[in-house]
């Protein structure tokens, strides 16, 4: 019996009040979507909607069918609450 090779990846989801980092051992050829589905993160954080939340590897947006490499860091991004340009304008205005 031939064993499939495995890879190790890190899965990160950060909220304002907590940070979750999981180390996952997956079969080589696994995708981001498979990693997230197998992690239990969607049950733990039901607000994550993979059709809305963007995902990435090492801060670069990737599709859910992206095939992972050993030591990749998968990040699930939350939607922005305020446009960064608008937030900067507010801060500048407050200082005046």
Image (cartoon, rainbow, N blue to C red):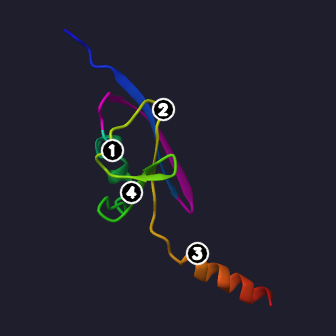
Among all residues in the image, which is located at the extreme right?
A: 96
Q: Give the mark nearer the N terminus: 3 vs 1.
A: 1
Q: Label 2, on which residue?
A: 71
The image shows residue 12 at horizontal and vertical percentages of 48, 47
Q: Can you say whether 51 is above or below 36 in the image?
A: below
Q: Give the mark nearer the N terminus: 3 vs 2.
A: 2
* Cα separation between marks 1 and 4: 22 Å
Among all residues in the image, which is located at the extreme left?
A: 1
Query: Mark 1–mark 4 contact, CB under 8 Å?
Result: no
Q: Is residue 59 left or right of residue 94?
A: left
Q: Which labelled disc corresponds to residue 84?
A: 3
Magenta-drawn segment? 15-30
The image shows residue 82 at horizontal and vertical percentages of 53, 78
Q: Give the mark nearer the N terminus: 4 vs 3.
A: 4
* Cα separation between marks 4 and 3: 25 Å
In terms of depth relative to the viewer, which is nearer, 85 or 76? 85
Residue 29, image quadrant = top left
Q: Label 1, on which residue?
A: 66
* Cα separation between marks 3 and 2: 30 Å
Secondary element type, mark 4: loop
Label 3 Cα crowd, 10 Å radius (few <14 / some 14-19 / many 20+): few
Q: Is residue 32 left or right of residue 88?
A: left
* Cα separation between marks 1 and 2: 14 Å
Q: Label 4, on which residue?
A: 45
Of badges 1 and 2, the one in the foreground is: 1
Q: Main secondary structure of the magenta part?
A: strand
Label 4 Cα crowd, 10 Å radius (few <14 / some 14-19 / many 20+): few
Which residue is drawn at the image coordinates 67% and 85% (left, top)?
90
Q: Give the mark nearer the N terminus: 1 vs 4.
A: 4
Label 1 Cα crowd, 10 Å radius (few <14 / some 14-19 / many 20+): some
């Amino acid at each position: 019996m031939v064993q499939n090779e495995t890879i190790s990846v890190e899965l990160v989801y950060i909220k304002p009040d907590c940070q979750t980092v999981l180390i996952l051992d997956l079969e080589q050829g696994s995708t981001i979507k498979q990693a997230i589905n197998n992690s239990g993160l969607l049950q733990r954080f039901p607000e994550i909607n993979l059709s809305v939340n963007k995902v990435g590897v090492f801060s670069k947006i990737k599709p859910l069918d992206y095939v992972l490499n050993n030591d990749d860091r998968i990040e699930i991004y939350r939607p922005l609450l305020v446009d960064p340009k608008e937030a900067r304008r507010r801060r500048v205005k407050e200082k005046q």
